[in-house]
Image (cartoon, rainbow, N blue to C red):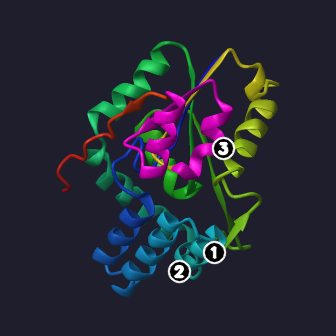
Amino acid sequence: MQIALFDLDHTLIAFDTGQAWTEFLIRRGHWPAEARETYLDFCRQYVAGTLDLHAMHRGSVGRLREVPAPTLARWLADFRAELAPRLAPAAHALVARHREAGDLCAIVTATPRFLAEPLAALFEVPHLLATESGLDEAGRRTGEIVGEPCFREGKILHVERWLARCFGRSLATVARSWFYSDSASDLPLLQAVSDPVAVGPDARLAAHAQAAGWPVIARPVLPSAP
């Protein structure tokens, strides 16, 4: 058994899913323009290594607290339609190479599951490990994270639980494992797989990859936005 794991933002895609979602909702008039700066501030915290993912979730997903589930489903369908032309052919080709080789493919992302699902479907990746968002009794987003965020060391926990639950395996017992990521925040999982690959890496990951002799590939090129 061989597995290929892919980070999402700035790895398989050349943009940030949460930022794209924020801009989508602002353009549609569903969110106020100031939501943009709120989200960008969280992005700056991420780059600085100070991000509290729970606070980010409350500040972004929490804005959907009053949105009925059917309405959110319509927004997500429209969002998926906007995302499709923004996916780079090189990213599709990378996933396809692993899929055609018989490798088990999964996206492993800190992005909330409900936002990552449209992208997993577009890439035809059957398994998605993501941060889980809480729901109230009416099926609306609460803004709280359920369980361990799929972030930093939490990505290893999500992968190990998935392998154990679905296949009775662990990272240590698969024949070969790849993980593709752009960020030093993913070093725990990159160091846990047999074949780490840095994708358009940030400065810290680039330095680590060079020192460790890891392969480095270019980030997928973003097609022109619609």
Looking at the rendered structure, the kind of residue marked 2 is Arg
Residue beneath label 2, please? 63
Image quarter of residue 61: bottom right
Q: Earlier in the sequence, mark 3 or mark 1?
A: 1
The residue closer to the viewer here, 108 or 213, is: 213
Q: Label 2 vs label 1: CA separation?
A: 7 Å
Q: Label 3 vs label 1: CA separation?
A: 26 Å
The image shows residue 51 at horizontal and vertical percentages of 58, 70
Pair 3/1: label in front: 3
Residue beneath label 3, please? 188
Q: Tell me: residue 177, above or below residue 205.
A: above
Residue at 49% across / 27% down in the picture?
Answer: 213
The part of the chain drawn in magenta is 184-213
Residue at 37% across / 46% down in the picture?
Answer: 13
Within 10 Å of disc 1 (Cα), the crowding (few <14, some 14-19, many 20+) is many
Residue beneath label 1, please? 143
